[in-house]
Image (spheres, rainbow, N blue to C red):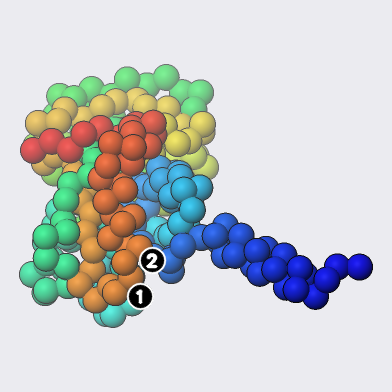
Amino acid sequence: MIHPFTRRFVLAGLAALAIGAAPSGQAPIVLAAASLQESLSAAADAWAKAGHARPVISFAASSTLARQAEAGAPGDLFFSADEDWMYALAAKGLLATGTRADLVGNRLVVVEPAGRHSSIPTSGARLARVLGAGPLAMADPDSVPAGKYGKTALEKLGAWAAVAPKVVRAENVRAALALVERGAAPFGIVYLTDAKASSKVRVAGVFPPTSHPPILYPVARLARSTNPEAERFRRFLLSPRGRAIFARFGFGAPAK
């Protein structure tokens, strides 16, 4: 029979071990661009394995998330696929001062269903003829970063006027990818990392980097956040270990 004092001592020790093994801090809420699904989820897993509460991540178009942040939706970090939406939040005083940083970069590509073997030209007339046959899946070119980059590239290459009437506007870049995966569109414009994440599509062409602004993914803490874990997770993402996780999924270093 265990002496009462000994029993209390053992139970106290077990309780201490349980507390030590539990994730530390409150889970931060991250509003993140849809194209970050695999990479940011992997970063969140690595953070959790280090003993922290796994971040809660909401993936959607950067435009949608920025509007949610403006409306006061819960969130600690904002991770955009372009600078415009980050600037929009900064202009309204919604970002914590000194926390905005460019984390990674990306490339813009044309994808088609796996099994096909097209080669997309980059000259205006030929590009317009191929993509203008439609339909062409794109994230909304009026607001979603991937669509805006795509429209700018097609304009620069002289193909937008012919392609625009055939564009199927998707709510985000992953929705555009899904249209190509299902065969609902013969071609789609997405990021290189989206193409790498899917076994159902192949890259048919890569847009010249000079045809659109550099694709940057800035991250910042929202001004209303009071969760110290949010800042710690932001710094982890920007660390060499964090950046290495994104590199595994095809993201490059941010470039201007």
Q: CA distance from mark 2 to mark 1?
A: 7 Å
Q: Is residue 173 above or below residue 12?
A: above
Pointer 1: residues within 10 angstroms few (<14), some, or many (20+)? Answer: some
- Is residue 76 at least partly visible in the picture? yes
In the rendered image, which residue does mark 2 sit on? 29
Please identify the quarter of the rendering in which residue 215 is found. top left
**Image point (28%, 73%), residue name:** 225
**Image point (38%, 37%), residue name:** 245
Give the image location of residue 138, x and y in percent.
31, 47
- Is residue 113 at least partly visible in the picture? no
View extreme (bottom): residue: 72
In the rendered image, which residue does mark 1 sit on? 74
Pointer 2: residues within 10 angstroms few (<14), some, or many (20+)? Answer: many
The reply to whether dot 2 and dot 1 touch (C-beta < 8 Å) is: yes
Left or right placement of residue 91 versus residue 104 in this view: left
User: Tag 1's secondary structure?
Assistant: loop
Left or right placement of residue 254 versus residue 14 in this view: left
Please identify the quarter of the rendering in which residue 185 is found. top left
The residue type indicated by label 1 comes to Pro
Q: Is residue 139 above or below residue 246?
A: below
